[in-house]
Image: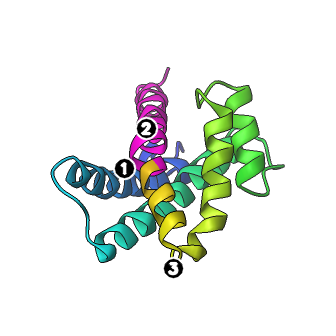
Amino acid sequence: MEKDKSDIRWIQRFSNFQAAIRQLQSGVDLINLRELSLLEKQGLIQAFEFTHELAWNVLKDYFYYQGNFEIKGSRDATKEAFKYNLISNGNIWMQMIETRNLTSHTYDKNTMEDIVSNIAGIFMPELAGFEKTMIKLKDDFQNGN
């Protein structure tokens, strides 16, 4: 008996990623309208953390489904995703990982401003590109291609 294709872990997690990236995009859109408050900047950073965490876990689950059980963390997932053209810029994804490590230092105004700027200007477009790639993979998978 064939398992329901919607019951695949990477597809379930990808659905959660899509909800998270919508929230992140809302915060980025707000930057274009006005200056964010301190609390809004902290919220944007938290939305980025959550979205990035889901992104690399989607990759891990996808590769696991493909039979690759060697992915242990975000760096492994990023390298493998770049190797298989699931992400377009491995350096930006590595920068996202480094930024995630800095997010505990958002009490420093300069660090916070740099992170917010990178989220809006560099990371969001890369995450959106990843979403498009995974939508195509999901659609192909669900259509039996």
Q: Is residue 94 left or right of residue 19?
A: right
Point 54% across, 65% down: residue: 111
Judge whether residue 132 is colored magenta: yes
Residue contact between numbered discs 1 and 3, judged by CB atoms under 8 Å: no
Mark 2 lies on residue: 131
Residue 139, percent from left and from top:
40, 29
Magenta stretch, residue numbers: 118-145
Q: Earlier in the sequence, mark 1 or mark 2?
A: 1
* Tag 2: amino acid: Glu
Residue 1, percent from left and from top:
54, 45
Q: Is residue 22 left or right of residue 50?
A: left
Residue 126, percent from left and from top:
48, 36
Secondary-structure class at tag 2: helix
Q: Quadrant of residue 93?
A: top right
| Alpha-carbon span between mark 1 and mark 2 | 7 Å
| Alpha-carbon span between mark 1 and mark 3 | 29 Å
Q: Earlier in the sequence, mark 1 or mark 3?
A: 1
Q: Is residue 15 left or right of residue 99?
A: left
Mark 3 lies on residue: 107
Of 1 and 36, which appears nearest the observer? 36
Mark 1 lies on residue: 18
Residue contact between numbered discs 3 and 2, judged by CB atoms under 8 Å: no
Residue 100, percent from left and from top:
60, 62
Most extreme residue toward the left, as rendered?
A: 33
* Tag 3: amino acid: Tyr
**Callout 1: few (<14), some (14-19), or many (20+) C-alpha neighbours within 10 Å?**
some
* Tag 1: amino acid: Gln
